[in-house]
Image (cartoon, helix red, strand yellow):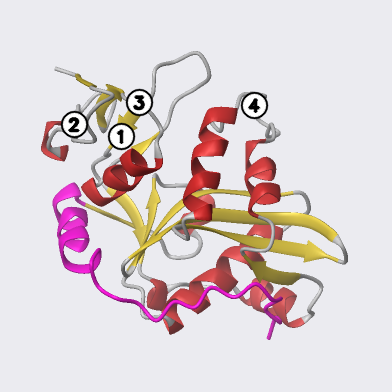
Amino acid sequence: MLTWLKRDSTDFPSIDNALREPNGLLAAGGDLSANRLIAAYRHGCFPWFQAGQPILWWSPDPRTVLVPKDIHISRSLVKLMRQQRFQVSFDRDFSGVIKGCSEPRDYTQDTWITPEMSQAYKELHYRGIAHSVEVWEGDSLVGGLYGLAIGKLFFGESMFSRTNNASKVGFATLVKKLTEWEFALIDCQMPTQHLNSFGAINISRTVFSNYLTQYLDETSKADWPTWPILQE
């Protein structure tokens, strides 16, 4: 049975109670306050819903993740990054990135990043928890991604590209930094061909929960820069 959350509590039901169909639906309702969102990611779930729907919270099984040190970068992407066509920055234009991620895609005009959702993650950014990666071509923002960093875990949320391979360059640059900062895992939530090409794998909800227990309260070496990261 689906649990409806109370607005005066940030508690979630056990992720073991998530439905099998649709896969991972755990709860509905509540709000998108910063405290609730932080509690959700620490608990192992995340919000995903369309405009007009109640807030829905998910904890799919299996969970798609990427171990930073195990990333696979194709030869063509390595070549592109060495050309230095793009410049990459961190936390320089969070609003621009989340706006880019909310734009309609080629395959749909719908977006799950509603104005309410956008504002909620901006609040997390102001608190130093949500971070953005910007990909620039000259002065134009052509791609990027955003997510949350808690302990030694990075929870990826969304990415976008306005030109070919821009988000790939941003993601590869982020993963390189997360490796240097000794992050243990990137939560990718659900599988995509794009993520699989980087070496993303599926793990059980139980194993994912073990990562949360082990690494959420660990201190990373993260030092989120605001200056451009030169491509090697």
* C-beta proximity under 8 Å, tags 4 and 1: no
- Type of amino acid at the residue the image marks with label 3: Leu
Q: Examine the image and state in which quarter residue 13 appears.
A: top left
The answer to which of marks 4 and 1 sits earlier in the sequence is: 1
Do the residues under discs 4 and 2 have CB atoms within 8 angstroms? Answer: no
**Residue 46 placement, left or right of 124:** left
Q: Residues within 10 Å of mark 2 (few under 14, many from 20)?
A: many
Tag 1–tag 2 contact (CB < 8 Å): yes
Q: CA distance from mark 3 to mark 2?
A: 12 Å
Q: Are marks 1 and 3 in contact (CB under 8 Å)?
A: yes
Pointer 4 residue: 108
Among the 4 quarters of the image, the one containing residue 10: top left
Coordinates of residue 197 in the picture (x, y in percent): 51, 61
The answer to which of marks 4 and 2 sits earlier in the sequence is: 2
Residue visible at 62% across and 45% down? 98
Distance CA(mark 4)–CA(mark 2): 27 Å
* Residue located beneath label 3 in the image: 56
Q: Examine the structure image and report whether residue 91 is included in the region drawn in magenta.
A: no
Q: What is the secondary structure assignment of the residue under circle 2?
A: loop
Q: Secondary structure at mark 3?
A: strand
Q: Calculate the distance from the C-alpha at mark 4 to the C-alpha at mark 3.
A: 20 Å
Instruction: Check disc 2 and report the residue beneath it.
Output: 18
